[in-house]
Image (cartoon, helix red, strand yellow):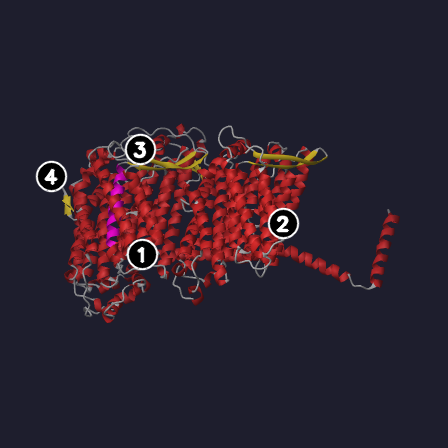
Amino acid sequence: MSAIHFIVFLPLLAAVVAGLANKSFGSTFPKVITTGSLFIACALSWPIFLHFLTGNFGPDTMVYDANAIPGGGWVAPVFTWMLSGSMQVDWALRVDSLTAVMLVVVTSVSALVHLYSWGYMSEEPDQPRFFAYLSLFTFAMLMLVTANNLVQMFFGWEGVGLASYLLIGFWFRKPSANAAAIKAFVVNRVGDLGFMLGIFGTFLVFGTIDIPTILAAAPNMHGSTIGFLGHRFDTMTVLCLLLFVGAMGKSAQLGLHTWLPDAMEGPTPVSALIHAATMVTAGVFMVCRMSPMFEQSAVALGVVTFVGAATCFFAATVGTTQTDIKRVIAYSTCSQLGYMFFAAGVGAYGAAMFHLFTHAFFKALLFLGAGSVIHAMHHEQDMRFYGGLRKHIPVTFWTMLFGTLAITGVGIPGIFGNTAFGFAGFHSKDAIIEASYAAGQTSAFWVGVFVALLTSFYSWRLVFLTFYGKPRWAGSEHIQHAVHDHHGHGHDDHHDSEAEASDHAPTADEILHGHHPEGTAGYHPHESPWVMLVPLVLLTLGAIFAGFVFHGAFIEPSAGESYWRGAIAFNEHLMHAMHEVPVWVKLSATFAMLSGLAIAYGAYIVSPSFPAKFAEAFRPLYLFSLNKWYFDELYNFLFVRPAFAIGRLFWKKGDEATIDRFGPNGAAKVVQLGSFGAARLQSGYVYAYAFIMLIGLTAALTWVIAR
Amino acid sequence: MSGFPILTVMLAVPAFAAVACLFVNAQSARWLALAATFVDLALGILLWANFQTGDGAAQWQFVEHVRLFGIGGAEFAWALGIDGFALLLIVLSVFLMPICIGASWRSIEKRVPEYMAAFLATEVLMIGTFAAQDLMLFYVFFEGGLIPMFLIIGIWGGANRIYASYKFFLYTLLGSLLMLIAILYMILTTGTTSIPALMAHDFPPHVQTWLWLAFFASFAVKMPMWPVHTWLPDAHVQAPTAGSVILAGVLLKLGGYGFLRFSLPMFPEASAQFIWLVFALSAVAVIYTSLVALVQSDMKKLIAYSSVAHMAIVTFGLFAFNAQGVEGAMMVMLGHGVVSGALFLCVGVIYDRLHTREIDRYGGLAINMPRYAVLFLLFTMASVGLPGTSNFIGEFLSLAGLYQVSTLYALLGTTGIILGAAYMLYLYRRVAFGDLTKDDVKAMPDLDLREFVMLGALAAVTLWMGVYPESFMKPMRGDVQKLVARLERAAPAGDSAPTVGKPAPAAAEHGEHAAAPAAHAPKGAPAEASAHGEAH
């Protein structure tokens, strides 16, 4: 046994124990078990990461029964999973510098989310189940990031999908939560179809599903072609694109993104852990893990860049008009994932992982902060009913402010020979934008810059609507409910609370013309308990310092090379070029950020009536964004309803009206008619029988004579 | 295990118990049947533990041979013996039987002794089918297995049981007759009834075609393959719970076993010749029956249609002619046997409480039946093919095998994972999720000990097969190798045919399109050109 075994399997053990114990020993026991094991896993993970950061790559001090792998890191075997013909699949835990990044991200955010949930879910009767699911998720995610072969990665991939399904549908009494859970699972399965075919194809070409072997062989595949669906294509392009379809599903990229906003039906800590910091970044992780393969196909990289940039833009435009605080952050996540993908697409895998790393901290922070706001506002999620909260929940306000400074990328660019310094997102996002310019992808660069403006706008819009201005709480049903029922009967209304905001999705006219009465309605928001504030404060530290402290290892040419050691296809030239981009390029992201801030300030602080006027003036555009580009409607029309209609058609017209009618029922009919005829002949009249005998005799005689 | 006729004993125990059941009262018959099935389970485990694997292990083990009589040079014998495939299917059968008896413990109240006798007879015939090494003996067991099933559906079934058992009979009849003719022809031309001998016999290709078609008529119905599947939903809906468990768990495996034992090794050329037919029917089945399953309002019908879709993955895998395909097909058969059996049991549990299979009559069971909800979820996820459960291993391997033959069919077959998730999760949502509003549903108690033990055992095996399938794959590895070696001469060329690449230029600048010059393409220059056209 070694540290990595404990890191991965402790959460599983905790999940099983908590799940089986359920409420038998009260709800504290499962909470202690799960949270405790996550903190242990976290405490074991950071030394591994630091181990790699300090350039110590051998398994010497860390493990006892593991095999060192070339380039640094080690693989801890568990046992053989499948052995079929030449296909061998092992359960094994791989630790290298890429895994190390994910280990700290997953265990840190998970541990903090576990802790936060003590407060957030305190009114919930089903807490053991919730904590068991959270730990199960963490286990699956850790199996994913430690996979040494594609099939184990797929195991983790589907495992996190299962946990996500269970947690989105945690409040299973709510129809909307159930629908969202199924949607998440099924849409992800569309991606998994690609992933599975990608694994099959990879096995066919390389004869193995072992990742290091595949990556070692990939550079020799130049010019190879492969047949796929009756045509011939470049081998690596086919394989990479199939795998990328899987990544698109899990990371909610344009086309397969529709499940992510709906996933906000789950409790807010879940959104922070699964749908912001960890699971949705699995696609980015996979592309980085397989980066030496993607490097072999310019076409595949082009697609990754395009899809990433398109998602980045799409999600940001939708994020600007949503009114549900969680949905704004959800679209923001989607958009940031787009950034990571186009970083990978232009070859800056280090920058992609860097943004994944910093994003995990500030986005988890924003989600948990939003949860704290929702908690304070008695489960109201609509920002139109917020306002003026900064005085009432100061800790939440300050932490979310830092989160916003991080996501919008506030910092001082290093243009005067000084060291660049800024909040986390400044280092990582600017690196992506600069890398895309340096790689010659100018259109991706401009999209990146424009989306930086949108990011800044929607993020500040969230802050201004929530914390500034006058209270608009009086219009909220949740608040009225809370005020009237002074003693607030806790969990009874909790179940359907989070969904209601989306249940009565506001029509455009409501938003444009409905007025939201100002006033507090006598409600007093309370700051959250310390178990919720401690994770916020710790994540704030990450949001402030993660970029500045770690940028060397992730993206600096020489430091990066010595950190990654071949765990990703680290492009040292590109990283050099990234630092040599013109000054205006370096300033562009900061300028975009400031513009977004200025617009948001003007629209929501200086002249609050402006947004409504703007929306009125550009109504079609506004509706297009508000309705999320009508993707849900389109998919409903194209896939969901036809599937049911065709199913019914096959059943009624195919099975019943054709196969049964001409098959067994037809045969029955024939037999029935035949026996009916035979029965008619059995009349019982002797003369009839005698007549028939006579005919028979005559016929027989005729035949004998005539032949 | 030399000398001890363990297979005969495994047949004799339930056979004697079946006869004995007819002479005792209901409660004694229940205990007697349970005891007999447990004895067979113990013997099955013994069989498994003593089965030799690895190099040097005999293909046929536990062989018994007693000459019965001879006609025209052909000898008919009481010949038993098993290889890895037969072993695993026997183990599956003896594992499911005690669960079937347990499932019928309270729900069957009329004619209990006869019912138990019918089940024990089914067990005899199933084990006999898998263990028979004599072609005539096989035929007797194979067809005989249907008779107790007719009775179970026809006597202890639901309201429309006569129609269902009649349909079941009619479908099987035609196939059986054609297969009998083929069997007689084979015996008369080769002069042997020994299955191992026939598996090594090379029939002329044109003869193979006809024989293959005759066998196919029988196996396709048993499988069942589209479009001869419509007996299955009706049979399942009408059968009592345990009948459905054994029907889905074991009887559906007879078709796959038939392909594995007869069609593939005895008629390799004909099998290769008809790959297109099998693949086309399987592809239709996956998509068609999955969509039909999506719109069902009867739980048993839904699971029955899903079985058709899963069995299509089996035929896909078998006719991929490679190790992954065949092993995957076997694993789907085993996994589906456990999981669909468990799902029918899950339906039975709530049917016993509310006496309806209408999905919409339920809802919110996760609230008042949490243990049930957890186990039902596990089996739902297994049916969906979640990694870590039994069905994933099979589906993954058979589709991986299929991909090596045809990317198009692999794509169509893999859509099953999307549609499967849709209909199973939709079912689960309607049964277990939602609010608990109906009074009679509210009154339903959670699993009792008997139900918990049955479902718990199935759950444990589902996870075992998913996490450490080696226990199941090891016994059949040698047989798969032999089968694949035999099929090799007829194996189809895959449509992927990747060409060999060459190392990338050392300093390939990122972002440049560094296409290889066409001159370096090893073969298929036109294809190479079109690939570049597609790539840009």
Residue at image mark 4 = A417
Q: Distance between the residues labelled 4 and 3?
A: 45 Å
Which numbered mark, 4 or 1, is in the foreground of this view?
1
Which numbered mark, 4 or 3, is in the foreground of this view?
3
| Amino acid under disc 4 | Gly
Residue at image mark 3 = A66
Q: How far apart are marks 3 and 1 (CA)?
A: 39 Å
How many other residues sit within 10 Å of disc 4, few (<14), some (14-19) or many (≥20)? few
Task: Left or right? Give the position of B45 relative to B8.
Answer: left
Q: How far apart are marks 2 and 3 (CA)?
A: 59 Å
Q: Which chain carries label 3?
A: A
Residue at image mark 1 = A266
Which numbered mark, 2 or 3, is in the foreground of this view?
2
Where residue B19 is drawn, which disc sits there?
A: 2
| Element assignment for label 2 | helix
| Amino acid under disc 1 | Gly
